[in-house]
Image (spheres, grey):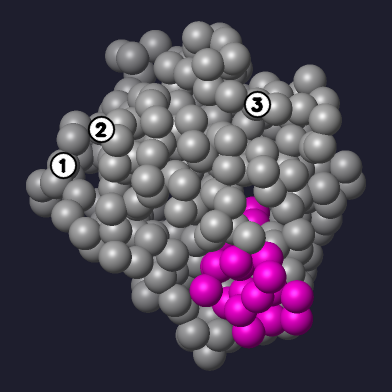
Amino acid sequence: MKRMLTCLVVGAALSRPSFAQETPDETSLKTVRLGAVELHYVEQGKGVAVVLVHGGLEDYRSWQPQMGGFSQRYRTIAYSRRHNYPNRAVEAGSDYSALVDAEDLAALITTLGLAPAHVVGLSYGAYTAMLLAVRHPRLVRSLVLCEAPILRWLPELEGGKTLFSEFMSKAWEPTVRGFRESDEAGVSAAIEGFGALGYFGTDVKVTLAALPPEVRRVLLDNAPEWRALTASKDAFPYVAPSAVKGIGTPVLLLSGERSLALHGVIDRQLEKVLPRCERVVISDATHEMWSDHPEECQNAVLAFLARH
């Protein structure tokens, strides 16, 4: 339970307190300008590119513990999606979603000359990576999806309608109301909402105020992302199963054995739909599988990449 309290996940994912110890010097950060948007990234290694795409309320720092292992074999890039630390604030409007992030990712891969790249995405970053493969297949060599929240599929799947309703009423809708008040209120509502879904177990109540200062700082650093999502007309855009079925690149689904039930329902459906797919379930892992079991996750992904 202690690990769960320090590896908070908020639907997409919350953030890892290890950032404070493992963040590279700011001077090692690079930037790429994509029109009006400027994205920060770090890079290590040489060879075929691997692009690491973080989850919600995170940034490039969440992948720092993995950079060394991947960069021994690959040119490894971890970047911060728009609205995430330390990117300059841009107007969110009401249309921000993983579709926007997918176009940013396509531009980043093209601008840096990374194509075709292996793309590894966690949670909302996996949603982004999947939409990249749907829209820009030539940019993707292989795809690793770690529990993409394709929530709009749930009402049509067995057992999914109830899970979708619970997610909306207990987590998402309170978070939307919280962000209308302030970033701190929004993050607080997200933590409490996912606690109500049972992510942290039934015997523990987690609040923002009770978290270590370094964890609160990282969450609030990245609150603008969820402020933008909660103001969006379509934060979880629908993607047709037929479009996903058209993804021709090899795909690895990485799932946590102890993740929320909705992730298992979605991943099992993806396993049926994707034509070139394999799935690995990380034993005893939550949605924050890369913190729960980093070595097992990295080994599974490296083995997959080596075959493609």
State the separation of the CA atoms marked 1 and 3: 31 Å
Q: Nearer the viewer, mark 1 or mark 3?
A: 3
Furthest toward the right, the residue is: 283
Q: Nearer the viewer, mark 2 or mark 1?
A: 1
Q: Residues within 10 Å of mark 2 (few under 14, many from 20)?
A: some
Quadrant (top left/top right/bottom left/bottom right) for the C terminus: bottom right
**Residue at image mark 2:** 87
Quadrant (top left/top right/bottom left/bottom right) for the N terminus: top right
Q: Residues within 10 Å of mark 3 (few under 14, many from 20)?
A: some
User: Up-down: is 283 above or below 72?
Assistant: below
**Residue at image mark 3:** 206
Asked which secondary structure carries label 3, the reply is: loop
Residue type, numbered disc 2: Asn
Assess whether residue 144 is covered by the magenta stretch: yes
- Residue at 74%, 35% in the rendered image: 200
**Residue at image mark 1:** 90
Asked which secondary structure carries label 1, the reply is: loop
Residue type, numbered disc 3: Val
User: Up-down: is 212 above or below 275?
Assistant: above
State the separation of the CA atoms marked 2 and 3: 29 Å
Whether pointer 2 and pointer 1 mark residues with C-beta atoms closer than 8 Å, the reply is yes
What span is in magenta? Answer: 139-165
**Looking at the picture, how far across and down is residue 97, in whole percent?**
34, 59
